[in-house]
Image (tube, rainbow, N blue to C red):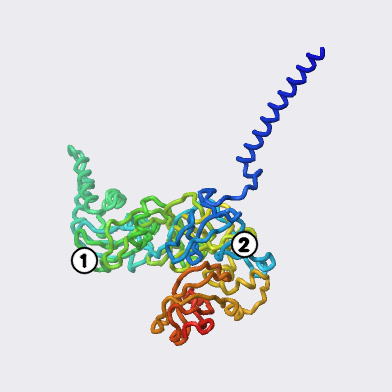
Amino acid sequence: MNKRVALGAAAIAVLLAIVGAWWINDHSAQRKTDPASTHAVPKKGEVINGVVQDGSGKQVLYWHDPMVPGHKFNQPGKSPFMDMQLVPQYAGEHGEDGVRISPAVTQNLGVRIGMAEIAPLINSFTAGCRMAFDEHQVEAVQTRTAGFVERLYVRAEGDPVQVGQKVAEVYAPELLAAQHELVTLARIANVPDIESLREAARERLRLLGMSRGEIRSVEQLGTPRPRVGVYAPSSGIGRELGVREAAQVMPGQTTVQLAGLERVWVLAELTERESGRVRKGQSAQISVGALPGETFEGTVDYVYPQLDAASRTVPVRIEVENNSGSLRPGMYAQVVLATEQRDALTVPSEAVIATGTRKVVLVRDGQSFLPVEIQTAGEASGRTEVLTGLQAGTEVVLSGQFLIDSEASLNGVLARLQSGAADVPPQRASEQATVTGQGTEVKVAPAQGMVTLSHAPIQALQWPEMTMAFKVRDPAAAQHLTPGAKVRFELKKEPEAGEYIIETIQPLDGSGQ
């Protein structure tokens, strides 16, 4: 019995040992793979998220050159821009390209925040244009026989004309002779094929320009009409008069030219680049200064094949319905052409700061603001497309950028922003931007007002030890210096040039004199 108890106890002990070993190994593996359950200090040379660590105990997000913000590197080394070593940027910290502002100061500055988000973007552009008659609705009213204008009913350009309206009355000897022939045939009876002769006479009158109604009237009354009417084939306005009353007309001569107003053409002159984005059938919106608040829908009807050599533009023709008659040829207008609609990453256009050589937005990260360089494309409906530099959901500054933009005034107001002293006068900001440093003269060029220094780290600017050239405010101050001299100097940033200039420079302990 005791032997059985001993064997059972031994079996239980072995089972517990196996389970315990499994539990320890499993949780140990979880601690190694689960970032949330480990607080291991990054080791020097270790690679985290593709970035080489420095062994300082903090995680390095990237390596960068403080003098050239915006360029990030995955490993330490010498800067390709300056004669200095790259410095690490740690997690939870911001470099000199960022600034932390208290919520109270943020509110006092009137900072508004927007969002980078995926939104429908309609690429469009605006062009000046003018209105013209639709040439498809222009018709010429002519006579088909020689004669004289006995009466003219459209006596001025611009007179309105309705379809079927009598435009003029013409005395034509040839028409009068053809009418006498029809009247004579109408009186003859009991002659074979007499009706075919009458139909031939009617057809002759129609070919000479006489209307069917007038032909019937001549047959019914049995009396020729000395004056024959000329009628409008369509509605419109008299655009051009070819004759005057009592004037002689010849076959094919235009009595009056009519232009319809049911539709008008909008003629836009587009640049070479814009013309490549326009296709037939695209919609367009037209606005006219004479009709504020009204817009008219049109359709691109034709993109002309030739380029104007003088203006380097391509004419584009847009058809617009003019049922109300409020659009008049000769008016100037603006046309908005929508060329493409797609989803794209966009930010409010007011968030984009154009510095001349690049475009920047200020990004909010908690209570901190950092300038981020972006590449943009088109702009529409108050939003700008962002190609690189941002992700959807990023918060960007819409107003107040001039106070926190590192390219404009960050160096001058950094001290008061970080301290929350929003009431520091503007003239004090330039005084706070003066910093002091020490270094060794490497090269002196008094004629050019330049000195090259190998300076120690400057904590106020977060500059590491490096060698660089500076301008001197007073070139005479550098004349008594010699290479190898140890000096003390004061720097101040010039807002216009965006570079630091030496305000004062003095030898240390009589060095270099």
Residue flagged by tag 2: what amino acid is it? Ser
Residue 506 image position (x, y, % from top left): 51, 83
Whether 495 is drawn above or below 369: the answer is: below
Is residue 157 toward the left or the right of residue 7 in the image?
left
- Give the quarter of the image for residue 480: bottom left
Marks 1/2 in contact by CB < 8 Å: the verdict is no
Residue drawn 40% across and 63% down?
127
Residue 218 image position (x, y, % from top left): 27, 51
Q: Residues within 10 Å of mark 1 (few under 14, many from 20)?
A: some
Whether 19 is drawn above or below 151: the answer is: above
Q: Which residue is mark 2?
A: 368
Is residue 188 toward the left or the right of residue 229 in the image?
left
Q: Is residue 119 visible?
A: no
Q: Secondary structure at mark 1?
A: strand
Whether 339 is drawn above or below 239: the answer is: above
Q: Which residue is mark 1?
A: 248
Residue drawn 58% across and 71% down?
460
Which one is closest to the eye, mark 1 or mark 2? 2
Q: Is residue 448 visible?
A: yes
Residue 125 image position (x, y, % from top left): 43, 60
Residue flagged by tag 1: what amino acid is it? Gln
